[in-house]
Image (tube, rainbow, N blue to C red):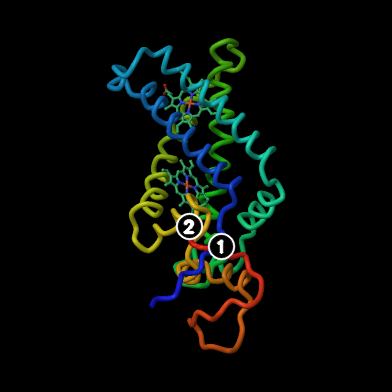
Amino acid sequence: MAPEPIYLRRFSRTERALHWVHAAAFFVLLGSGLVLYLPSLAFVGNRPLVKSVHVDTAIAWAAALILVALLGDRAGLRRTLRELDAFDRDDRLWLRGIPVRQGRFNAGQKLNAALAAAFAALFAISGLLLWYGERNTRFRFAGTIVLHDGLMWISLVLLVGHLYLALIYPKTRHALRGMTHGSVRVDWAWVHHRKWVDELLPLEGSAGEGDLRQPAGAIDVEPPQ
Ligand code: HEM
Ligand code: HEM
């Protein structure tokens, strides 16, 4: 009989809630933004309605993110932020296509997280300027709409890549389990995030390179769900 797979906890409830709130709001903002941007989509609804959906979602998005962060596991979020922020020599090598071991997040994921955070801030600033600009000409700048639209196009490209890796590419799509159930199979993590597995599972014995050795002692392991 095949042994029961071991699962490692990858994302806490707070991290998953944050991700899905961000993703859901992003999709509504993207959809309503596209309707505002493309005249050919104007049939979807009257413009003032779509615009208020867009602006209200932006407000709900910011409020929900703050709420999840305040009510959730803040210490865990800070730890994850530090992990995303730490860019070491291995990350630089990995980006140059050299297959070195990666930690809990690989260099591409760290870049994706940094871009998602920077874009969220830039969307909010440019969106607020668009909104204030309608009420007060002092806040009206020619570049604001160019920035807001440009961010949308770049985000769209990043999102397609993100969705491909999360839903389609066979080698990486097991990651989706981490973002839905919270845990991933240890053998998958061993291949993609070996430094992370090494930190979680202190190894026993001296088995050769590439062997999956038995986890020692109390570890952050969940039963399969
Ligand atoms: C805090 C976040 C955001 C705020 C406050 C915000 C606010 C706004 C405002 C006030 C407008 C002007 C509506 C009009 O009069 O036509 C606008 C337009 C638009 N937004 Fe956003 N937005 C935000 C995020 C986003 C995101 C995440 C996307 C796409 C991924 C997006 C895409 C667009 C697009 C495409 C337009 C139409 C611009 C045009 O007419 O050329 N926005 N947004
Ligand atoms: C249906 C839509 C989405 C799916 C299925 C999805 C899936 C995932 C998965 C599986 C992960 C975990 C990867 C890992 O194991 O580390 C992840 C992480 C992440 N997602 Fe999403 N995601 C979606 C939408 C979005 C959107 C709209 C954004 C931002 C605009 C976003 C931003 C991120 C970021 C910043 C991370 C952490 C860094 C990374 O792993 O790249 N996701 N997503």
Secondary element under disc 2, as helix, strand or loop, is loop
Q: Are marks 1 and 2 in contact (CB under 8 Å)?
A: yes
Residue 165 in sight here: yes
**What amino acid is at disc 2?**
Gln
Specify the amino acid type for callout 1: Glu
Image coordinates of residue 5 in percent, x first then y, are: 46, 69
| Residue 98 seen in this snapshot | no
**Residue found farthest to the right:** 75
Compared to residue 22, the image places residue 145 above or below, namely above
The picture quadrant where one finds residue 157 is top left
Note whether 209 is above or below 43 in the view shown. below
Q: Looking at the picture, how far across and down is residue 211, in whole percent?
A: 49, 82
Position of residue 67 relative to residue 180, above or below, is above
Residue extending farthest front: 1
Residue occupying image coordinates x 60% and y 68%: 89
Nearer to me, 88 or 13: 13
The x and y percentages for residue 191 are 46, 71
Location of residue 79 (image quadrant): bottom right
Q: Please name the residue shown 53% across and 37% down the image.
A: 21
> Is label 1 in a helix, a strand or a loop?
strand
Front-lying residue, 134 or 163: 163
User: In screen coordinates, is 118 left or right of 165?
Assistant: right
* Pointer 2 residue: 225
Q: Which residue is mark 1?
A: 222
Determine if the C-beta at disc 1 is less than 8 A from ligand 2. no
Numbered circle sitting on residue 181:
none
The alpha-carbon separation of the residues under discs 1 and 2 comes to 8 Å
